[in-house]
Image (spheres, rainbow, N blue to C red):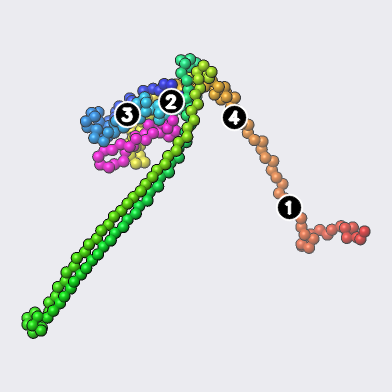
Amino acid sequence: MIEDVPDFVPLLSGLRNTLALTGHQDLADELLPRQQLRDRNDNVQRLLRVLDRDGSTGLLASAMDGGVTVELLDGRKTPYWAVFKVDRVGDGVWDGEADDGRDMEYITSAVAQESTAHDEGESVGVEGILAASGRPDGGKGQVKSTGGAGGVGLAKGSGRRRGGATRGQLGMKTVAEAKTAKSARMRVPVVPSLELHRGDRRLAVAGLGRTTLVHRILEADLKALSRVTTPAAPPPTPARTPHREATPPWAPGARAACPSRWRPK
């Protein structure tokens, strides 16, 4: 359980300064404006939801396992991404017992969902055409032939759609009471960073340097981890002698069998 995390919000201003120093001040003003009214795409607000205390605590596992990606829009449909990372740079050290009386909860849940959809459609149409032609004055006048056509059509359609969804969830909650399950605080050294990418190219990166976060862990887990050792290297496998098949007696170069094998008994 995460007990305390550093303030990651200054990474935002650090990324702005890095962009300005590298000649991308216009990009910093477009993607990460300092005034909320100019942030038409809510880039800063979405990024702050990841960097603030609540967001970073909930996403810390993802930040330490490759990074958390936030898409940034600039109004020109250019793909930009901000990646929030937290790298562990050392082993955790003992920071005292957690004797504040807080219980630790472990929740395991499984979710199954199923949805179905059924579409039905029906259409009916009627069409009629009437055509006529004639020869005025028996075809002796200036107009040799004339004709005309007319039609009418009628169509009707209807459609129905049915859908359904079922969802099932099973969960188990385990509570480690502070009275019976003692816990301790471990201080872990980390290096947080915030990167800006465009496509497969990294444009800028900002960091806070070496800092620490506090992680609460059960003392029973610490004792179990202290007994974990690196497995011993397996002994080298001896080289096997290549197996040679027996040469049939009729093959060229085969040795003759002992005559005693052929003597009658």
**Residue 70 x, y percent position in the rendering:** 34, 35
When the figure is inspected, residue 138 is found, relative to residue 252, above or below; the finding is: below
At mark 3, the secondary structure is helix
Q: Residue 197 carries which label?
A: none
Q: Which residue lies furthest to the left in this view?
A: 142
213 left or right of 180 in image: left
Task: From the image, state whether disc 3 or disc 4 is nearer to you.
Answer: 3
Q: Which residue is drawn at 91% across and 60% down?
A: 263
Q: Name the residue under label 1.
A: 244
As for residue 65 lying within the magenta part, the answer is: yes
* Numbered badge on residue 48: 3
How far apart are labels 3 and 4 at the CA level?
Answer: 41 Å
Q: Position of residue 2 (x, y in %)?
A: 44, 24
Q: What is the C-alpha distance between the residues marked 1 and 4? A: 40 Å
Quarter of the rendering containing residue 165: top left
Q: Mark 4 points at which residue?
A: 230
Residue drawn at (30%, 53%) of the image: 159
Q: Which residue is drawn at 47% across and 25% down?
A: 105
